[in-house]
Image: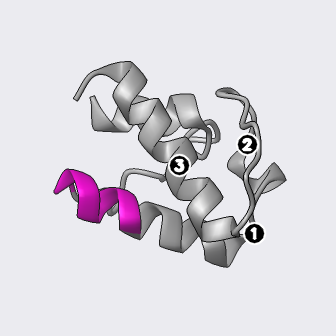
Amino acid sequence: MEQKEIKDMIKEIVCMISGKKMEIVDDMSLFKYINALDAVYVVMEIEKRTGKNLSGKFKNKSDVMTVNGLTKLLL
């Protein structure tokens, strides 16, 4: 997957999980759009679609829960 495809996928998943269509800024914390429980479901759906295990990738990284941060983990 290319960077743009990953970003679009993450934004689509966040909108799907939240049940709202919204514009998501790439470097804004996803917690501005969803709550912590929703974030778990977002990560699970990303893992399902990409086949990548993101477990343990969030330690000591404050920027991971952004579109840009998640994209970096997936590239």
Kindly identify the residue that appears in the image at 65 percent across and 28 percent down: 26
Q: Is residue 21 magenta?
A: no
Please name the residue shown 78% across and 54% down the image.
33
Residue for point 22% across, 51% down: 50
Query: Quick one: label 3 or label 1, which is nearer the N terminus?
Result: 3
Q: Secondary structure at mark 3?
A: helix
Q: Percent x, y for residue 51?
A: 16, 57
Q: Is residue 28 left or right of residue 59?
A: right
Q: Residue at x 75, y 61 (%)?
A: 20
Residue 25 visible in this rendered orientation of the protein: yes
| 3D distance between C-alphas at marks 3 and 1 | 16 Å
Query: Residue 15 lies in what quarter of the image?
Result: bottom right
Q: Tell me whether circle 1 and circle 2 mark residues in contact (CB < 8 Å).
A: no
- Residue closest to the far right: 32
Nearest the camera: 18 or 38?
18
Which label number is shown at residue 12?
3
- The answer to the question of whether label 3 and label 1 lie on touching residues, with beta carbons closer than 8 A, is no
The span from disc 2 to disc 3 (Cα, nearest Å) is: 15 Å
- Which residue in the protein does label 1 denote? 35
Residue type at mark 2: give it: Ser
How far from the left and from the top, in percent, is residue 39? 60, 65
Q: Main secondary structure of the magenta part?
A: helix
Residue indicated by mark 2: 29
Camera-side residue: 32 or 2?
2
Amino acid carrying mark 3 in the image: Glu
10 Å crowding of disc 1: few (<14), some (14-19), many (20+): few
Q: Nearer the viewer, mark 2 or mark 3?
A: 3
Which stretch did the figure color magenta? 45-52
Identify the mark nearer the N-term, 2 or 3: 3
